[in-house]
Image (spheres, helix red, strand yellow):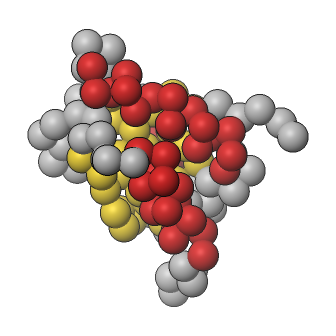
Amino acid sequence: MENHKPVHISDAEFDTAILKSEKPAVVDFWAAWCGPCRMIAPFVEELANEYGEKAVVAKMDTDANPNVPTRYGIMGIPTLIFFKDGKEVDRIVGVPRQPKEALRAKLEALLTAPVAAR
């Protein structure tokens, strides 16, 4: 099995990498100085490794890329936003009680949900 890592994306790459993706996507909005972001990072890495074939798992540094976080009204980090068919379908703000299970459950729901009519 190939080892997948989260894709680091910028404001400029966001629309193409996430909104136009054929696969469901989850974006971890984070910053280097954020303690809770470092707590959740290993779980995002695991998610990328497990679901890299079926979903886009991305990270966006909010300090280096302020436009997309502003567009999505992100007020606190870490914030993870789940996208399907170019639309936000769910989000987690902060570190959930059981991060691995919470992230996996939301991503599984995206993968098993019927595709929206275009």
Tell me: residue 48, above or below residue 115. above
Work out which residue is located at the far right of the displayed protein and give it: 1
Q: Residue at x 33, y 35 (%)?
A: 29
How many marks overall?
A: 0
Q: Is residue 43 above or below residue 51?
A: above
Is residue 74 rendered to the left or right of residue 39? Answer: left
Residue 58: percent from the left, percent from the top? 50, 38
- Name the side, left or right, on which 21 lies relative to 51: left
Task: Give the left or right position of residue 84, taking residue 93 as reference.
Answer: right
In the rendered image, is residue 28 in sight?
yes
Give the residue displayed 24% in from the left and 46% down from the top: 93
Residue 15 seen from this side: no
- 30 up-or-down from 117: above or below: above
The spot of residue 48 in percent (x, y) is 62, 40
In depth, the one of 103 and 91 nearer the eye is 103
Residue 111 x, y percent position in the rendering:
60, 68
State the residue in front, 78 or 96.
Answer: 96
Judge left or right: residue 27 versus residue 93.
Answer: right
Task: Identify the residue at horizontal 49%, vertical 46% (top origin).
Answer: 100
The percent coordinates of residue 49 (x first, y second) are 68, 39
